[in-house]
Amino acid sequence: MGWFRSGLFWRTFLLLSILTTVSMASWIGMISTMQRGAKVEQTAQLVISVVTITHAALTHSAPELRRELLFELVSNEGIRIFTLEDSDVVDPPPDNPLMPDIARIVREKLGADTQFSSSVNGVAGFWVSFKIDDDKYWLMLERERLSGLTGVQWLGWASVVGVLSLLGAALISSLINLPLARLTAAARDIAQGKRPAPLPEKGSKEIIGANRSFNQMVDDLQQVESDRAVILAGISHDLRTPLARMQLELEMAQLGAEAREGMQSDIAQMDAIIGQFLDYARPTEAATFVTIDISGLLEDAARAAERLPGMTVNTDIAQDLLVNGNATDLRRVVNNLIENARRYGQTPGTGATEIDISCRVKPTGLGKRVVIEVQDHGVGVPDDQIEQLLKPFTRMDTARGQANGAGLGLAIVERVVLRHNAELIVSNRQGGGLRIQILLPLAE
């Protein structure tokens, strides 16, 4: 059942195998039923014919020629004639489902006193009794002349047909599963930021239609990415240029210290929000992935965070852990998590922020993963609202305190993590605060 649930190939293969087995069993049963009557009649007529011909030959032959006749029957026909004695050791007839019907038909022709045996005096064969006047005789036929396919032969043929059927089922399952496997691999490439090769537009009309639609979707997504790059460049130029001019004019204006600080804070906030929008929309290209020393990257980020006022950073980072990814994007992820903790994770009643950063290797079902963990000691988030944190433009201000920003920090983290084929887990820390885990594949 695990194989049955694991994928379309095994599911199709198992269903085809069951169908083939049931069909074979039905055919064998039907053939056996249809052949039973014909087999009984054929065997009975053979026995009757042999006994009748032998009886006639012995009756009408001269006494001096009977020995020679018996020799010819043994040599050429495999028929032996013996005198029936009361002292003969007679075994029961052959244990065959057809034997009762054969015996009934033969006795109807040769007489009700006809006897059958599978062995007489230790000699195995198919024995039938008959009479010539008052003398009784045994006629022995070789079993090979009466036997059809044995159970071993039936099993052998059934095994050959079964193996060929299973190979055919495997081939059919592969052909059915191949287009879907290609589509799954292409969709996985898109999820990882890669541009997949065009899917072949051949096969059945359903496969052609699905592959053609998928190829068109890939082209449309590529065009959207190109258009977005142009828009991002426009936003960066059209918005940040006026902000820079405003900052310059503010420096030259004759304003009080309080008004100047307020306007500078507003400009810095607008510039940070624009930066968040750009980070959220910027694609992470898999082609830019390189091997990164994630341990060193986390230590650098921790040292930078310790220099911020009111920050305490506790680290437990294993050394020399390597992952594949975009160094700039992963650094942005770590900085976003630290900034998130700094803004929202202040320890209640202290006004200061304490952050725990750890990194270690953890074996999983998908291989070894590097687990990055960032925790704060704040008030945390209600459990029923944790999923909302990952949605764009969402801020849990009521739970985490007032802060500036567009609510894109964790949304940016999630987008980058997914493009790195990693996993993001958000939960509350025991004792208060938010815990964020990132599971990255360990580089070879």
Image (spheres, rainbow, N blue to C red):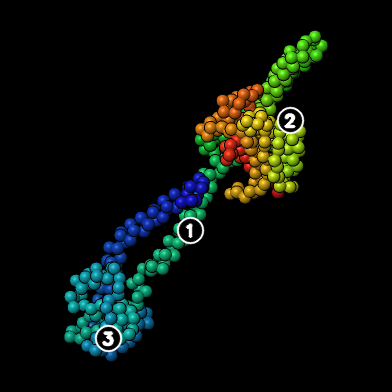
Q: Are marks 3 and 2 in contact (CB under 8 Å)?
A: no
Element on which disc 2 rests: loop
Of the image marks 1 and 3, the number of the one nearer the N terminus: 3
Examine the rendered structure and indicate whether residue 221 appears above or below residue 127: above
Does residue 441 appear anywhere in the picture?
no
Crowding near pointer 1: few (<14 within 10 Å), some, many (20+)? few
Seen in the image, is 125 located left or right of residue 270?
left
Q: Quadrant of residue 184?
A: top right
Q: Which residue is mark 1?
A: 163
Q: Where is residue 439 shown, x and y percent of the image? A: 63, 42
Q: Quadrant of residue 352?
A: top right
Q: Which residue is mark 3?
A: 89
Disc 1 residue type?
Answer: Val
Disc 2 residue type?
Answer: Pro
Q: Which residue is mark 2?
A: 309
In front of the other: 64 or 320: 320
Q: Where is residue 217 shown, x and y percent of the image? A: 59, 29
Give me the residue at 35% from left, 79% from top: 78
- Furthest residue to the bottom? 64
Camera-near label (1 vs 2) is 2
Of the image marks 1 and 2, the number of the one nearer the N terminus: 1
Give me the residue at 39% from left, 54% from top: 22
Camera-near label (3 vs 2) is 2
Does residue 111 appear anywhere in the picture?
yes
Label 1 – label 2 distance at C-alpha: 74 Å
Q: Where is residue 52 shown, x and y percent of the image? A: 25, 76
Q: How many marks?
A: 3
Of the image marks 3 and 2, the number of the one nearer the N terminus: 3
Examine the rendered structure and indicate whether residue 262 appears above or below residue 435: above
